Image (tube, rainbow, N blue to C red):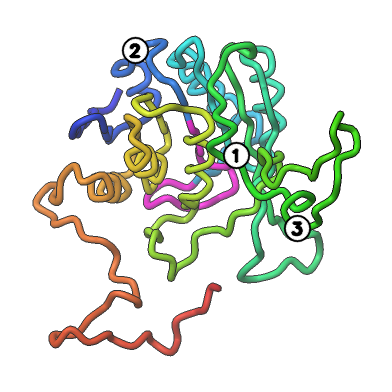
Amino acid sequence: MTAIRKFTRGPHTVFHADCNDVLTSEIRDGSVDLIFADPPYNIGKRFVDFVDKWPTDSDYADWCKVWLEACIAKLAPTGSMYIMTSTQCMPYLDLYLRDRISVVSRIVWHYDSSGVQAKTKYGSMYEPILFCAKDPGNYTFNADDIRVEAPTGAKRKLIDYRKPVPATYSTTKVPGNTWFFPRVRFRMPEYENHPTQKPEVLLERIIAASSNPGDMILDPFAGTFTTCAVAQRLERQSIGIEREVDFVKIGLRRLGICDELDGERLRPLDKPYNRRNANGGRIPEPTDQPRLF
């Protein structure tokens, strides 16, 4: 076990450590209402000093099984868990989890393309999410908090003649299992320096649907700590675990836990849209900056 550093302010805690060490020693079984896990995908992305590539998919799945078992143990009896990974590796986790927890929904998060386009195959424009519940008959799902526009009722004004008294279709509905949210791009205000940052709107839907104010939210691979930041805004408690100190700094700053770590002032990225000169004027963007959206 490596050393664990813990930072807490109010109902929000950041751990700088390996998630398996923290799950084993720091978090009580049955104490978490919602887990969002967005681990490395086994596709070769670099996270500071770590490259997320295992010798085989089976080796990756074996690594996942360790923290998945620990996460299931930490869930409260009515708790839920959302799991993400690559399209290639999700079947391994799906088959493993369905014997240990109820898989309620299989969700596709899709987005617009950017950057270099595939030329010899169909480009990847989605990521899978498993929505699981510890007790399939008793879990939180706040349908009214995540309703979206229903085009049939809101735009087409069609009549539902199946009702005793015919009436137009409802103008809102619970989202289906295909979700469109843009990926986080360089010029977005929420952007942080991380290769796989998830958008706040994605976490807003998950947290609003599957937890209540005051509930405990756990993210074992916190990255930019979007899960914790959204939990804070929605008046939940949060625990974020991250092994890379560069990303821990992001979490400490975003959650307002501290503004300095190991003598370093924690400051947001100097993005083009907020760079200013000594007189307060905006510094123009460099002409060679790639345009990402």
In the picture, the disc for residue 118 is none
Residue depicted at x 69% and y 56%: 125
Residue depicted at x 58% and y 12%: 138
Asked if the residue under mark 3 is in contact with the one under mark 2, i.e. CB atoms within 8 Å, the reply is: no
Q: Using residue 162 as the reference point, say whether residue 211 is left or right of it.
A: left
Q: CA distance from mark 2 to mark 1?
A: 25 Å
| Chain-order first, disc 2 or disc 1 | 2
Which image quadrant: the C terminus? bottom right
In the picture, the disc for residue 155 is 3
Magenta region, residue range: 36-51
Q: Depth check: give the residue in front, 203 or 42.
A: 203
Residue 161 placement (x, y as % from top left): 90, 38
Closest to the camera, between mark 1 and mark 3, is 3
Q: What element does badge 2 sit on?
A: loop
Q: Using residue 137 as the reference point, say whether residue 275 is left or right of it.
A: left
Q: Depth check: give the residue in front, 94 or 78.
A: 78
In the picture, the disc for residue 85 is 1
Residue 110 placement (x, y as % from top left): 67, 52
Q: CA distance from mark 2 to mark 3?
A: 49 Å
Magenta stretch contains residue 131: no
> In this figure, which residue is indicated by the disc labeled 2?
28
